[in-house]
Amino acid sequence: MPAGDVETVFVDGQWTNQIEGEGLSHLVFDTQEEAAAEGRRLAKHAEVGHVVKNPDGTVVERSSYRSDAHDVAG
């Protein structure tokens, strides 16, 4: 299970997911959408953040699935 955030990235002509502190996943995808779906699944399972980047490195989407969010009573 990933300990760091998951990033969906374009590397060497293929889409994959990079786990912070662990490097690139061995899984590659034909489309950004396929890779992002797997990245979301990994991030939800590990309760970490997920970032989707365009090939130029710009952030397209950022989500957090952390369970440590504090509820604010008011």
Image (cartoon, helix red, strand yellow):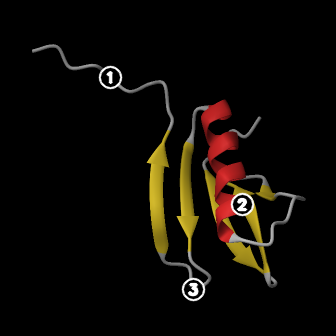
Can residue 11 be seen?
yes
| Picture layout, residue 59 above or below residue 5 | below
Cα gap from disc 3 to disc 2, whole angstroms: 18 Å
Q: Residue at x 65, y 64 (%)?
A: 33
User: What residue is disc 2 on?
Assistant: 34
Q: Amino acid at mark 1?
A: His
- Drawn side of residue 64 relative to residue 19, left or right: left
Q: Earlier in the sequence, mark 3 or mark 2?
A: 2
Residue at the limit of the structure toward the right, as seen here: 26
Badge 2 crowding class, 10 Å Cα cut-off, few under 14, some 14 to 19, many 20 or more, is some
The x, y position of residue 72, in whole percent, is: 20, 20
Camera-near label (1 vs 3) is: 3
**Mark 1 / mark 2, whichever is N-terminal:** 2
Question: Is disc 3 in contact with disc 2, using a CB cutoff of under 8 Å?
Answer: no
Q: Residue at x 38, y 27 (%)?
A: 69
Of the numbered discs 1 and 3, the one sitting upstream in the chain is: 3
**Residue occupying image coordinates x 62% and y 82%:** 55
- State the quadrant of the C terminus: top left
Rendered view: 9 above or below 7: below
Whole-number angstrom distance, CA of label 1 to CA of label 2: 31 Å
Residue 12 is left or right of residue 37, and the answer is: right
Residues packed near mark 3 inside 10 Å, few (<14), some (14 to 19) or many (20 plus): few
Q: Which of the 4 image quarters holds residue 16? A: bottom right
Which amino acid type is shown beneath numbered disc 2?
Glu
What is the spatial separation of the Cα atoms under label 1 and label 3, in whole angstroms?
Answer: 34 Å
Which residue is labeled 1 in the image? 70
Q: Residue at x 56, y 71 (%)?
A: 53
Determine which residue is flagged by label 3.
Answer: 56
- What secondary structure is found at the residue carrying circle 3? loop
Residue 35: x and y in percent read 71, 61
Badge 1 local density, few (<14 within 10 Å), some, or many (20+)?
A: few
* Label 1 SS: loop
